[in-house]
Amino acid sequence: MKMIKIKQVKSSVACKQAHRDTVRALGLKRIGQTVFQKDTPQIRGMLKTVNYLLAWELTDETPSPKVKKPNAKGYTVIKQKQ
């Protein structure tokens, strides 16, 4: 299935509330963040609405899985001593 790679390139602070809500609905929270969405008519309409804030491209690649980072202390407990 075709995917759309969307990146936020401008801030939505001075925009209409509806445009800010659209950017959030696309899954974007900050400038420079990239998300992947399925290529559907609904997503295309959202992109058309806020095209001045975003850069996007069609792609066949799928998003890479997120890598879990170790916890704050740098180790994990496997089994507790009794």
Image (cartoon, grey):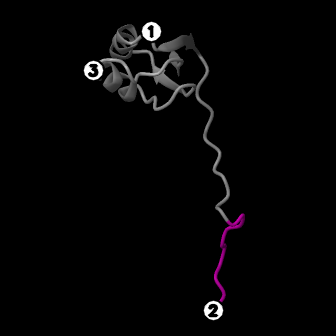
According to the picture, the residue beneath numbered tag 3 turns out to be 18
Circle 3 residues within 10 Å: few <14, some 14–19, many ≥20: few
First-in-chain label (3 vs 1): 3
Image side of residue 16 versus residue 24, left or right: left
Q: Nearer the viewer, mark 2 or mark 3?
A: 3
Looking at the picture, how far across and down is residue 72, in whole percent?
65, 62
When the figure is inspected, residue 65 is found, relative to residue 5, above or below; the finding is below
Looking at the picture, how far across and down is residue 13, in whole percent?
39, 24
Q: Is residue 79 magenta?
A: yes
First-in-chain label (1 vs 2): 1
According to the picture, the residue beneath numbered tag 1 turns out to be 52
- Identify the mark at residue 82; answer none if there is no mark: 2
Q: Main secondary structure of the magenta part?
A: loop
Tell me where the magenta segment starts and ends, as one range.
73-81
Looking at the picture, how far across and down is residue 82, in whole percent?
63, 92
- Identify the mark at residue 35; answer none if there is no mark: none
Q: Identify which amino acid the numbered label 2 is placed on.
A: Gln
Identify which residue, 17 or 58, lies in the foreground. Answer: 17
**Numbered disc 3: secondary structure:** helix
User: What's the residue at 37%, 19% (across, down)?
Assistant: 14
3D distance between C-alphas at marks 2 and 3: 56 Å
